[in-house]
Amino acid sequence: MNMRRVATVVGLLLFLLQISQMSFFSPQALAAFPAQDMNFTLEGKITEKSAGKLTVSSGENMIFHVLYNDKTEIKKKDGSPGTPQDLHTGLKISVAGDLAESGEITAAKIEIEG
């Protein structure tokens, strides 16, 4: 596991530890986190796809929900621009975006790795 992935996993675990110690849906719990999102990166395989949403498995027994829209930059393996139609189940991708309080990742960039 590379150091970037370790740092990302450690950050996510710290975030999950914080929310596990409070009632997640209470106003106090939501007020404990800043209104702005957090930068987040993820590598994994698409296990499900629906309009505007991907389910991605990191291969470490962790599943993430990735939201994408017309502002999301999609790049193919060769570096050329991609489209949502290029995304399909079984495809390995790298995602950079914001981790919301809900646990969903809003993708700013999706790179197709294979």
Image: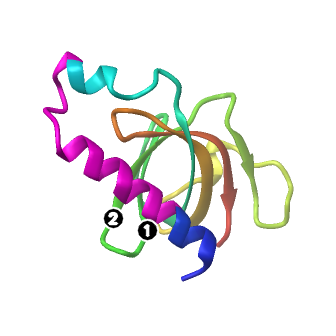
How many residues crowd mark 2 within 10 Å: few (<14), some (14–19), many (20+)?
Answer: few
Residue for point 17% across, 26% down: 25
Residue for point 58% across, 53% down: 87
Picture quarter containing residue 70? top right
Q: Position of residue 12 (x, y in %)?
A: 41, 55
Residue 25 in magenta stretch: yes
Q: Is residue 5 left or right of residue 83?
A: left
Dominant SS in magenta: helix
The one nearer the camera, 34 or 40, is: 34
Q: Which mark is residue 11?
A: none
From this viewpoint, which residue is outermost toward the top?
A: 27
Picture quarter containing residue 104? top left
> Quick one: SS at disc 2?
loop
For label 2, the residue is 62
Q: Position of residue 18 (x, y in %)?
A: 28, 45
Residue for point 52% across, 31% down: 37
Does the residue at mark 1 contact the one at mark 2 (Cβ under 8 Å)?
A: yes
The one nearer the camera, 86 or 70, is: 70
Say if 15 sits above or below 38 in the image. below
Q: Position of residue 64 (x, y in %)?
A: 39, 53
Q: Point out the stretch of residues depicted in magenta.
A: 8-27
Q: Which mark is residue 58?
A: 1
Residue for point 33% across, 33% down: 102
Tell me the distance, in whole angstroms, between the alpha carbons under discs 1 and 2: 6 Å
Amino acid type of the residue tagged 1 in the rendering: Ser
Amino acid type of the residue tagged 2 in the rendering: Met
Say if 113 sits above or below 41 in the image. below
